[in-house]
Amino acid sequence: MTNRHRVSVRCVRRLFPANHPLLPVATRLCQHRKPGADPCITCWELTIRNDERVVVEFELPREVETDRFYVDEIAVERACRGERVNLTRAERRAAIELLHTRRLSPSQIARVLHTNDDSVRATLSAIVRPTSQLRAVA
Ligand SMILES: [Zn+2]
């Protein structure tokens, strides 16, 4: 590996962090990378050019406004199967709620979602509290 190659790998990681929305696409496209390695700069470039073509062809907005309450149910289901998935706050809450309805304990939920017990308990108390408050009023 040359110094020039090391610099370019570092630049790629800075430009395209692990939460980049096109990372899964670039990873699938990059067939010549080592298992577990980041996609190469050539495959990143191709991925971004392909994405840009779709934006132009379908006249899509360049910057997509994200709905912070939108829940990608497939991402939630994958996370609930134990896959490491980057979830939004709303998706994380939905995943915890789903696993809770499947009668998993907070510790089990934390293990499945690769997080810690305290954050699961905090989310569950926020989800469960409104119901118990309703019971107290009724
Ligand atoms: Zn590649």
Image (tube, rainbow, N blue to C red):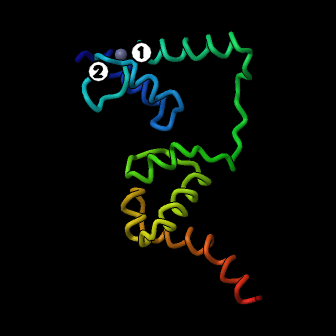
At a point 62% along the width and 72% down the height, the residue shown is 126
36 vs 19, left or right, is: left
Q: Nearer the viewer, residue 80 or 13?
A: 80
Residue 38, picture quadrant: top left
Q: Identify the element where label 2 is drawn.
A: loop
Q: Quadrant of residue 112?
A: bottom left
The quarter of the image holding the C terminus is bottom right
- How crowded pointer 1 is (Cα within 10 Å; few <14, some 14-19, many 20+) is rated as some
Q: Residue 124: x and y, percent?
A: 55, 71
| Callout 1: SS | helix
Identity, as a three-letter code, of the amino acid under mark 2: Arg
Q: Is residue 69 above or below residue 125?
A: above
Give the vertical position of 125 relative to 53 (above or below).
below
The answer to whether residue 21 is left or right of residue 78 is right
Q: Amino acid at mark 1?
A: Cys
Q: Tell me which corner region of the image, top left, top right, bottom left or bottom right, holds residue 128.
A: bottom right
Do the residues under discs 1 and 2 have CB atoms within 8 angstroms?
Answer: yes
Disc 2 CB within 8 Å of nearest ligand 1 atom = yes
Q: Is mark 1 within 8 Å of ligand 1?
A: yes
Q: Which residue is rendered at x = 28% and y = 16% of the image? A: 32
Q: Crowding at label 2, few (<14), some or many (≥20) Cα neighbours within 10 Å? A: few
Q: Residue 33 got which mark?
A: 2
Residue bearing the label numbered 1? 43
The residue depicted at 40 percent of the width and 18 percent of the height is 29
Of residue 110 and residue 5, the one placed in the foreground of this image is 110
Give the residue at the far right of this rendering: 137
